Image (tube, rainbow, N blue to C red):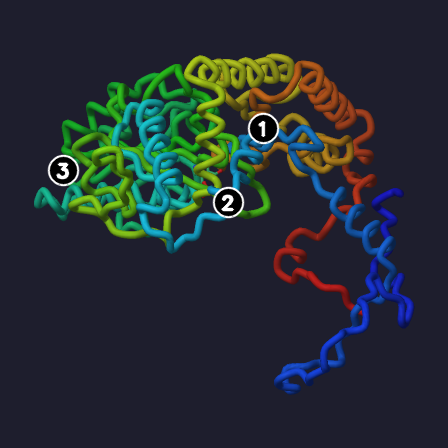
Amino acid sequence: MNNKNLPLLMNQSKKGRKAISLPEIGVEKSSLPNSKFLRDNIDLPEVGQLDLIRYFTNLSSMNFSIDTNFYPLGSCTMKYNPKINEQLSSIQGFANAHPNQKDENLQGCLEVMYDLQNELGEITGLPGVSLAPLAGAQGEYAGLLIAREFHKYNGNDHKKIALIPDSAHGTNPASASMAGLDAVTIKTTSEGDIDIDDLKSKVNQDTAVLMLTLPSTLGLFEPNIIEITEIIHDNGGLVYADGANLNALLGITKFGELGIDICHSNLHKTFSTPHGGGGPGAGPVMVTKNLESFLPYPHVKKEKNNYETYTPKNSIGRLNGFLGSFGIVLRAYAYIRSLGSQGLKEISENAIINANYIQEKLKSHYTLTSSRNCMHETVLSAIKQKENGIKALDIAKKLLDEGFHAPTMYFPLIVEEALMIEPTESESKETIDQFIECMIKISELSENNPNEILNAPINLPVERLDEALAARNPVLTWKK
Ligand SMILES: Cc1ncc(COP(=O)(O)O)c(C=O)c1O
């Protein structure tokens, strides 16, 4: 069936038809407790079981996912989620653990958490690890609260400025503001690096933290990182690295060795736990030894072969209920353990090679934002195509029609008509070549037949939406 023509379940409804029939009950009927909660005016579809199954099976195939399509959504690391991680996370002892169980009955879960704390400490070079944050942005918030508490503890409550480059991820200034810090923007040079002169002119004794995204949202490694961390430390500040995109750095460098004091990482990106469309995530925060006592609750320690949760001495407190996103932590742990240190390094190397291959092949068709090699993602601009009336959004719609998920668009904000492409290490050369061919075809179409792009998508269940209207006035339920 062409999904586009999937009939609405409501339209297949026939009065009295049922998807299931139950045997007569063998006990006395009793009336429902409170009839005021019963409604008889709900129009529910009445369909047979096969129609019901076909409807939902077809509906489930209408979405893009990493298991169905190439998904180069920049900064989101939509890599393959190995199925063994799912199997391991459904082992009964883990899957049935109850959040209210006491530590002594949760030794297996706590051991996994303890080991993952250590693995992440080793990977980032920052040994104090908390798995508590439930998302990357919450990891940022936790890390910045740690920085604030650290300064307060040392009698430096006046340190309230967060220096944030304009190439940082959008959540960075938002998290700084939530943590009670005032964000001050640092400029980026035309090559995409932090403008050191601008940094020097803005850093002072009120600087609490420099928060940079590494690699930056331009997909670039910061070449002056050592000099930058020294400038901040000389002014009594701390350096925070947004390590959501750690997929570029595994086994290649460690934040701790670059002079970074705090970072977070998104398990639901680099460590291959399912994401997209919401759902649970985890954004562990990692700190240097001298910041460890500020970590959130729960932290897991090992005492005489027993694993225990505890609250670190100067803890910023609790960020969520129970043990956080344990199912996600478990999948990430399985991923790290199944790859080992060599495997992790190869992941980053391949992610970088794939992104540079795309950059190299597309650089004469689209506009590059930096002449340097990129890390795990490349940011192209569609300014050339815009001269023919084709914007980044149109290119994204055409890609959807051709069976590829769109790259991230209009981000980072400092790049006009940005297309941020992150292929990840998961993809074969053949898939990447098909994507490159498609991007080249779209660029050619923008000159020869722009209408074909402007009319896309035509093959998807939903054609072009009025996106502003859809966001402001979403119609989420069937209406007669
Ligand atoms: C660089 C960067 N920082 C932070 C975040 C925020 O992570 P989350 O969406 O889990 O809150 C993201 C998300 O994609 C990101 O790419």
How crowded pointer 2 is (Cα within 10 Å; few <14, some 14-19, many 20+) is rated as few
Q: Position of residue 311 (x, y in %)?
A: 22, 47
Q: Which mark is residue 360?
A: none
Task: Check disc 2 and report the residue beneath it.
Answer: 95
Crowding around mark 3 (Cα neighbors within 10 Å: few <14, some 14 to 19, many 20+) is some
Q: Earlier in the sequence, mark 3 or mark 1?
A: 1
Residue 435 in the image, given as x and y percentages of width and height: 70, 22
Q: Could you give the CA–CA distance between mark 3 and mark 2, rounded to whole angstroms?
A: 49 Å
Whether residue 181 appears in this view of the structure is: yes
Which amino acid type corresponds to the residue marked 2 in the rendered image?
Answer: Ala
* C-alpha distance separating marks 3 and 1: 47 Å
Q: Residue at x 35, y 44 (%)?
A: 132
- Position of 175 with respect to 75 (left or right) is left
Residue 246 vs 354, above or below: the answer is: below
Q: In this rendering, is residue 64 above or below 218? A: below
User: Is 247 positioned to the left or the right of 154 in the image?
Assistant: right
Name the residue carrying label 3.
205
Report whether 438 appears left or right of 471. Answer: right
Q: Quadrant of residue 47?
A: bottom right
Q: Which residue is mark 1?
A: 82
Q: From this viewpoint, which residue is outermost toward the left?
A: 155
Q: Amino acid at mark 1?
A: Pro
Compared to residue 287, the image places residue 153 above or below, namely below
> Percent from the top left, x then y, of residue 11?
88, 63
- N-term mark: 2 or 1: 1
Report whether the residue tagged 1 is closer than 8 Å to ligand 1: no
Which is more toward the observer, 253 or 174?
253
Between residue 101 and residue 209, name the one nearer to us: 101
| Vertical order, 152 against 68 (above or below) | below
